[in-house]
């Protein structure tokens, strides 16, 4: 049963919360005293809150998820964890998250609360509205980024803001396109918004946002000296993700990063290049 509860929390998706470390990492402050301590506590707070959001989403979608070849085996839709237990878990996770954030810094409480509101609204109705569903996902990434900036009192560069926003739209579009391709005519039964996108719209949006991401990231690196050399890595990562999506290998960003050795290598090389260009 413990394994089922852990699966319900989706710990693999916690990787997205590493976004809070981007401001100090790119500002050359990741090695400063207390950064890792405060950052890890905030990371845990966002992990708890994001898991609460996933549980809430599973509760709302438990009937729809039965139409999905993989999601129907999740603990809530499959009935391994009943509705009452899932509700209690979501409430406890939310309370623990806010308590931990309050103990770390009052500055991040508004961001964590904002993230919770966006998650609830997304699960309730935003995800059913075309385009709005993509922006809803992006809002979560931007809140994490801004929370990291506020926690460590680091201004967020406009180019970094745009890069994160457009990259999140690119990744979420790729995920939706992958779902549409894999589910085919049954896509609308699983996710209402998929039936409302005209043919070719998601693919076109993915290509468009991928192109603009490359431009905004290149602009961000112009005054970062050696970081400019990471632009080819960015391009390779974007193209590799597009190849995965269009080849039917899945579009979940986290799963793609962990299951695709080339994408994982590109990610590690990017971190190494950041360290080399900023800290050495």
Image (tube, rainbow, N blue to C red):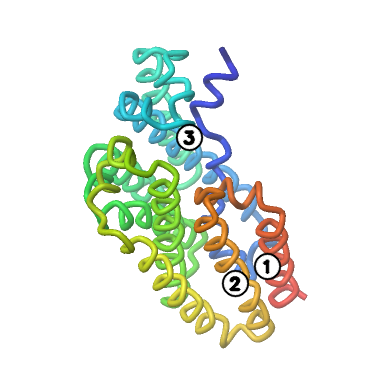
Q: Residue at x 46, y 41 (%)?
A: 101
The answer to which quarter of the image holds residue 273 is bottom right
Question: The N terminus appears in which quarter of the rendering?
Answer: top right
Asked whether disc 2 touches disc 1, contact meaning CB atoms under 8 Å apart, the reply is yes
Question: For mark 1, what is the residue?
Answer: 270
Q: Nearer the viewer, mark 2 or mark 1?
A: 2
Label 3 residue SS:
helix
User: Height in image: 250 above or below 159?
Assistant: above
Separation (CA) of disc 3 from disc 2: 30 Å
Q: Is residue 126 left or right of residue 251?
A: left
For the residues labelled 2 and 1, the Cα–Cα distance comes to: 8 Å
Q: Find disc 3 in the rendering and name its residue.
A: 48
Q: Which mark is residue 150?
A: none
The residue shown at (63%, 66%) is 29
Tell which tag, 1 or 3, sits nearer the viewer: 1
Using the numbered discs, state the Cα–Cα distance from disc 1 to disc 3 in whole angstroms.
27 Å
Q: Nearer the viewer, residue 38 or 124?
A: 124
Q: Nearer the viewer, mark 3 or mark 2?
A: 2
Q: Quadrant of the C terminus?
A: bottom right
- Residue at the location (51% across, 56% down)? 245
Indicate the position of residue 16 as horizontal and vertical percent values.
52, 49
The residue indicated by pointer 2 is 234
The percent coordinates of residue 223 (x first, y second) are 57, 87
Total labels: the figure holds 3
Question: Sequence order check: which comes first, mark 2 or mark 1?
Answer: 2
């Amino acid at each position: 049963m413990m394994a089922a509860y852990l699966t319900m929390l989706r710990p693999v998706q916690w990787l997205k919360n590493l976004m809070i470390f981007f401001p100090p990492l790119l500002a050359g402050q990741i090695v400063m005293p207390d950064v890792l301590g405060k950052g890890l506590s905030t990371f845990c707070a966002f992990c708890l809150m994001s898991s609460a959001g996933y549980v809430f989403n599973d509760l709302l979608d438990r009937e729809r998820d039965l139409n999905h070849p993989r999601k129907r085996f999740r603990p809530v839709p499959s009935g391994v964890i009943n509705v009452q237990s899932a509700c209690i878990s979501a409430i406890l996770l939310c309370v623990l998250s806010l308590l931990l954030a309050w103990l770390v810094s009052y500055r991040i409480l508004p961001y964590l609360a904002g993230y919770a509101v966006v998650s609830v609204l997304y699960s309730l109705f935003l995800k059913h509205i075309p385009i709005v569903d993509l922006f809803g996902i992006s809002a979560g990434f931007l809140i994490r980024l801004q929370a990291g900036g506020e926690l460590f009192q680091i201004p967020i560069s406009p180019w970094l803001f745009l890069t994160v926003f457009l990259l999140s739209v690119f990744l979420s579009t790729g995920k939706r396109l992958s779902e549409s391709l894999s589910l085919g005519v049954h896509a609308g039964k699983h996710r209402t918004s998929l039936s409302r996108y005209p043919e070719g719209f998601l693919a076109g949006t993915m290509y468009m946002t991928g192109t603009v991401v490359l431009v905004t990231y290149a602009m961000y690196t112009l005054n970062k000296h050696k970081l400019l050399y990471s632009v080819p890595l960015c391009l390779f990562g974007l193209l590799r993700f597009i190849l995965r999506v269009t080849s039917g290998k899945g579009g979940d960003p986290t799963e793609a990063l962990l299951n695709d050795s080339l994408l994982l290598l590109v990610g590690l090389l990017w971190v190494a290049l950041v360290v080399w260009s900023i800290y050495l």
